[in-house]
Image (tube, grey):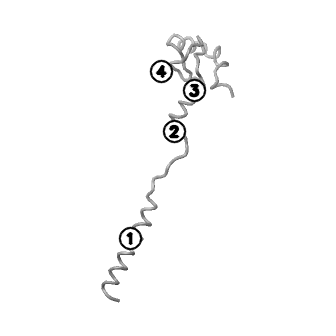
Amino acid sequence: MSRRTLGLGLAISFLLIGSIAMTGCKKKVSTEPAKSEQAVSESILQTSCPVMAGPIDKNIYTTYKGRKVYFCMQSCKEAFEKEPEKYVSDLPQFKD
């Protein structure tokens, strides 16, 4: 076997090994929804304040039984926190 043939064989071998190694380095893409998407879907379910029935402000919320509850104003949040069971039945995130 000549030096040229040997060199060409080694070069091809390195290229094959390199391409095989590179196929294992692909980034895996998750098909699971991100946690922020879950929070967004909860806010979409609830569109009105449980206390005053006004449009929600996504910046005013509390967590009750592991689920976010949104309000139109701070005073509604405070009223809910005093008597949450009074309002829960009308919230879509608690209808299972």
Q: Residue at x 55, y 46 (%)?
A: 31
Q: Label 2, label 3: how many angstroms apart (C-alpha)?
A: 16 Å
Of residues 77 and 12, which is closer to you in this image?
12
Mark 1 highlights which residue?
A: 15
Mark 3 highlights which residue?
A: 44
Mark 2 highlights which residue?
A: 34
Q: Secondary structure at mark 1?
A: helix
Q: Secondary structure at mark 2?
A: loop
Q: Label 1, label 2: how many angstroms apart (C-alpha)?
A: 38 Å
Specify the label residue 24 is tagged with. Answer: none
Amino acid bearing label 4: Asn
Q: Residue at x 51, y 10 (%)?
A: 75
Instruction: Judge depth for marks 4 and 1 and give the one in front.
Output: 1
Q: Position of residue 11 (x, y in %)?
A: 35, 75
Q: Quadrant of residue 14?
A: bottom left
Q: Residue at x 50, y 22 (%)?
A: 58
Q: Residue furthest bottom?
A: 1
Q: Earlier in the sequence, mark 4 or mark 2?
A: 2
Q: Quadrant of residue 1?
A: bottom left
Residue 59 in the image: above or below residue 9: above
Mark 4 highlights which residue?
A: 59
Residue 79 in the image: above or below residue 17: above
Amino acid bearing label 2: Ala
Q: Earlier in the sequence, mark 1 or mark 2?
A: 1
Q: Label 3, label 4: how many angstroms apart (C-alpha)?
A: 14 Å
Instruction: Judge depth for marks 2 and 3 and give the one in front.
Output: 3
